[in-house]
Amino acid sequence: MYCSSIKSMLLVSSRTLRSLCRRVHTKPSAEAATESARVRRLFDGLAAGERAALAQSITLVESTARRDHDEAQHLLQLVLQENKARRKGQLGSFRIGLTGPPGTGKSTFIETFGKFLTGSGYKVAVLTVDPSSAVTGGSLLGDKTRMIQLTRDPNAYIRPSPTRGHGGGVTRTTCDAIQLCECAGYNVVLVETVGVGQSEYMVADMVDLFLLLIPPGGGDELQGVKRGIVEMADLIAVTKADGDHIPECRRMAAEYISALKFMKPRSQLWRPKVLQVSAKANVGISELWGVVQDYRNALEPNGELGHRRQRQRVRWLWTYVGSELERRLRSHPDIAACTATLENAVIEETITPGHACDELMSRFFKGNS
């Protein structure tokens, strides 16, 4: 029974799962041989730092076609082992998440910051996220057009991706794209979120440092305290600190410094800092990178960043589990018929959405609890 197979999949031990995976991957076929050749070509290209291979690999991982799923997982497994071997107990690439409300100047900041990093000898990958239309499902993916200089930099790679309805300001495969970028030799990975306001906390579960960008005049101190996203920030930068904006930026910085005093820091070894930067005038960029280095030096030697990555991987495991269970629920014919009935009952206000959810779960897992 389908429901039984789902629960068995969730309850299977890690030893049994590894044995099962070995049996699955040892089945020879002409199709598997073709897929392995494609995966090997992409992996070899990634290991050699080829941008084309990186672009094709991210496209494969982002694909929603079921025929690409096995290839993508095979490639990611090879990449995972390669990155682990290269790190030799170290962190590998350093990952920075950036977010902020619209009008903050995130793209302008990323271009200036990225050019500073490449000029300092780093290879920088930028993963930007664009919201997908709720009507058409499409995305503009226009971030690269606002980073003209960085796009031309041979030591930088920019990849815009659509959310496809995934919440939290990131895509479902962003964490996989980070692994691919590291395998391709990029030692600093910047992840820019959608930038819709207060909900982009999920990026904090895939990066080492969470940078919050705030525009001048973005609200008073109380508003800053109420934003839950501020509590997740490791570093806050007030942008556009040039010209007539300087007095307002100073006031904003002082307010956020005061607000942070009443918030519990994420780490006992680090209290979030507030800086003023201007991407247009190239002010405060080197100072910001110096603070990032201080943050890394404070948290990496004692293993805190490594432990944080371990917790992040577990959280994303369950994110994938939830996404896959929902997909299988919606695609199963028997459950689809049940879902339609319950949806109509909710529309007619015969039952509450919560009760409909309980009914759906009880039918789906009937006889397996």
Image (spheres, rainbow, N blue to C red):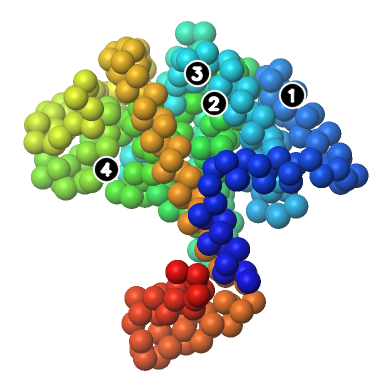
**Mark positioned earlier in the residue sequence (3 or 2):** 3
Q: Earlier in the sequence, mark 1 or mark 2?
A: 1
Quarter location, residue 229: top left
Residue 228: give x, y in percent of width and height. 23, 46
Q: Position of residue 354 (x, y in %)?
A: 34, 76
Q: Nearer the viewer, residue 49 or 339?
A: 339
Query: Residue at (22%, 39%) from the top-left corner?
Result: 231
* Residue found at x 42% / y 32%: 310
- The numbered mark at residue 45 is 1
| Closer to us: 319 or 61 | 319
Judge left or right: residue 39 versus residue 355: right
- Residue 26 point in image, percent of width and height: 79, 40
User: Label 3, label 2: how many angstroms apart (C-alpha)?
Assistant: 14 Å
Label 4 environment density (alpha carbons within 10 Å; few <14, some 14–19, many ≥20) = many
Instruction: Looking at the image, tell me whether mark 3 or mark 4 is earlier in sequence order.
Output: 3
10 Å crowding of disc 1: few (<14), some (14-19), many (20+): some
Q: Which mark is residue 92?
A: 3
Whether the residues at callouts 3 and 1 have beta carbons within 8 Å, the answer is no
The amino acid marked with disc number 1 is Gly
Q: Is residue 192 visible?
A: no
Q: Are marks 1 and 2 in contact (CB under 8 Å)?
A: no
Query: Residue 361's spot in the image, x, y percent?
Result: 45, 73
Disc 1 to disc 2, how far (Cα)?
A: 16 Å
Tell me the residue that label 4 is attached to: 229
In this view of the protein, which residue sits in the foreground, 121 or 228? Answer: 228
- What type is the residue that disc 2 sits on? Ala
Q: Label 4 is placed on what type of residue?
A: Ile
Reading the image, the residue beneath label 2 is 125
